Image (spheres, rainbow, N blue to C red):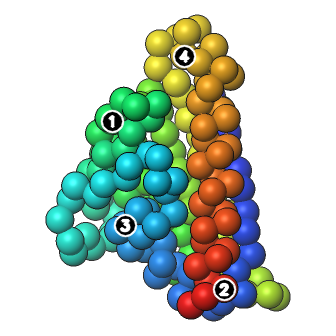
Amino acid sequence: MYKIQDSLVINKPIDIVFEFFNTPKNLSLITPSYMHFNLLTPDPIVMKEGAVFDYSITIMGLPIRWTSLIVDYDPPYSFVDIQLQGPHSYWHHSHTFTKHDEGTLITDTVHLLMPFGIVGKFGYHLLAKHLNNALFSHRKKVVFDYFQNH
């Protein structure tokens, strides 16, 4: 199992920061354009435990459909989504929001497994690890810039 963890402090109250992430259509704002993110579930999507939403992305030119399920929901402090369908054998993404002296600390923690056994492990180290790091780096910059301007 692989782990990705990233955090960012935003100089805004927790309720405002949580609401941004509580809106699935905002995934299109924070996903790199080369991934061609497309939310397939019609609006409005009500975030709650048990909510399911579908979207498509492109990875290295290959279209991939991804289905997420919200398995834990504790506004404005956290929510957890898992992948029901998508490129990973396992994907568990915890989003936590903590009050901080400078505003709100956002922490993303992802645990994931790649498909295809040893080939998947090789693929993770060769490519997927770098793609995920680039994705989270991009998200961090876009989220920071968004809240600087709103």
* Residue 148: assigned label: 2
The residue under label 4 is 120
Image coordinates of residue 114 in percent, x first then y, are 52, 24
SS for dot 2 = helix
Image coordinates of residue 112 in percent, x first then y, are 56, 35
Task: Name the kind of residue labelled 2 in the image.
Answer: Gln
Q: What quarter of the picture does the N terminus occupy?
A: top right
Which residue is at the front of the view, 135 or 52?
A: 135
Upstream in the sequence, badge 4 or badge 3?
A: 3
Say which of marks 3 and 2 sits in front. 2
Task: Name the kind of residue labelled 4 in the image.
Answer: Gly
Query: For mark 3, does the 10 Å Cα neighbourhood hold few (<14), some (14 to 19), or many (20 or more) residues?
Result: many
Indicate whether 143 appears above or below 126.
Answer: below
Horizontally, residue 73 falls left or right of residue 126, namely left
Which residue is at the front of the view, 23 or 110?
A: 23
Indicate whether 114 appears above or below 150.
Answer: above
Residue at mark 4 to residue at mark 3: CA–CA distance: 28 Å
Which residue is at the front of the view, 56 or 50?
A: 56
